Amino acid sequence: MPKVHELSATVSSKGQVVIPGDVRKRLGLVQGSVLRFVLDADGVRLLPAAGDVRRLKGRLPAPPKPVSVAEMNRAIADRRAGIAGRG
């Protein structure tokens, strides 16, 4: 059975809640993040919503040299051939 870590927060008169830091870290939440509240028979789950992929721009370093589409296609074909060869 997974370890349970329980945290609490107080709801303001406007229905606002401050999400504890441990929860924000675990969900990867930053200012402007969108959350999903999933209601089921067991209660409520708080999940990060899928974000816009454009928000990731600039998070990774640029590759040392540009890669062409032909090179990408060749790498994919080589990988598929290697996987098929193992079966």
Image (cartoon, grey):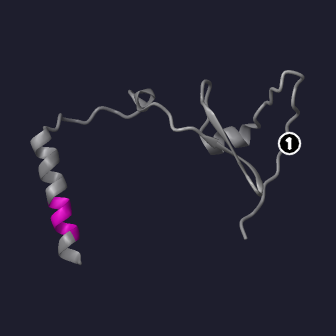
| Quadrant of the frame with the C terminus | bottom left
Residue, disc 1 = 8
Residue drawn where x is 57% and y is 38% of the image: 49
| Quadrant of the frame with the N terminus | bottom right
Inspect the image, locate mark 1, and give the three-letter code of the amino acid beneath it: Ser
Residue 50 percent across, percent down from the top left: 51, 38
User: Where, by quadrant of the figure, is residue 69 drawn?
Assistant: top left
State left or right for residue 33 relative to residue 65. Answer: right
Q: Residue furthest front?
A: 41
Residue drawn where x is 78% and y is 59% of the image: 4
Give the main secondary structure, helix, strand or loop, of the magenta stretch: helix
Counting every numbered tag in the picture gives: 1
User: Where, by quadrant of the figure, is residue 20 drawn?
Assistant: top right
Residue 2 percent across, percent down from the top left: 71, 66
Looking at the image, is 26 positioned above or below residue 21? below
Looking at the image, is 23 positioned above or below residue 42? above
Residue 78 percent across, percent down from the top left: 14, 60
- Chain part drawn in magenta: 78-83
